[in-house]
Image (tube, rainbow, N blue to C red):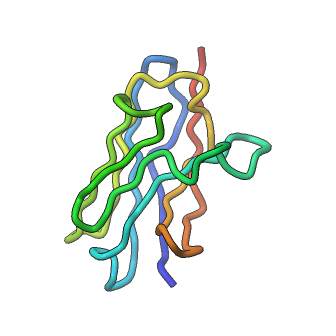
């Protein structure tokens, strides 16, 4: 089982930016497809999407339409970290953001992002 610990959440005004980080454990990190998902308050997961951004071990990235062009996912395999740079935030981005390993049940506890208008 992979341990995942997120950080970097907080409260920001609309139009602002935040950077989320996820530190992972385990020897297989560099081969894992990692993702950031979000869970709006009162919901299990953002509807219709398993993730807002994902990145393969080789660095291929994919984004939900709602964040494409505003969010950037990256990884550092040596440091076992996955980063989500979020720009031009809107109140609709408010959610608990959590890091997860695609194809497994491994996920972190999450970090709260709140965007105020």
Instruction: Please indicate whether residue 16 sits to the left or right of residue 31 in the image.
Output: right
Q: Nearer the viewer, residue 26 or 103?
A: 103
Residue at horizontal 60 percent and vertical 62 percent from the top:
109
Q: Quadrant of residue 46?
A: top right
Q: How many marks?
A: 0
Q: Position of residue 81 (x, y in %)?
A: 32, 63
Instruction: Return the residue found at the far top.
Output: 117
Instruction: Please indicate whether residue 24 sits to the left or right of residue 56 in the image.
Output: right
Residue at horizontal 52 percent and vertical 51 percent from the top:
51
Q: Position of residue 90 (x, y in %)?
A: 53, 22
Residue at horizontal 37 percent and vertical 36 percent from the top:
71
Q: Position of residue 13 (x, y in %)?
A: 51, 19
Q: Position of residue 45 (x, y in %)?
A: 67, 50
Q: Nearer the viewer, residue 61 or 70?
A: 61
Image quarter where the C terminus lies is top right
Instruction: Return the residue found at the far right.
Output: 42
- Whether residue 26 is situated above or below residue 84 in the rendered picture: below
Residue at horizontal 55 percent and vertical 65 percent from the top:
108
């Amino acid at each position: 089982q992979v341990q995942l610990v997120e950080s970097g959440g907080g409260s920001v005004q609309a139009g602002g930016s935040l950077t989320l980080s996820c530190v992972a454990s385990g020897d297989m990190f560099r081969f894992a497809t990692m993702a950031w998902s979000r869970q709006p308050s009162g919901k299990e997961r953002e509807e219709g999407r398993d993730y807002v951004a994902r990145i393969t071990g080789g660095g291929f990235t994919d984004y939900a339409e709602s964040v494409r062009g505003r969010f950037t996912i990256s990884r550092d395999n040596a440091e076992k970290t996955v980063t989500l740079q979020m720009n031009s935030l809107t109140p609709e981005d408010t959610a608990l953001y959590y890091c997860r390993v695609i194809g497994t049940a491994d996920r972190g506890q999450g970090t709260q992002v709140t965007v105020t208008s």
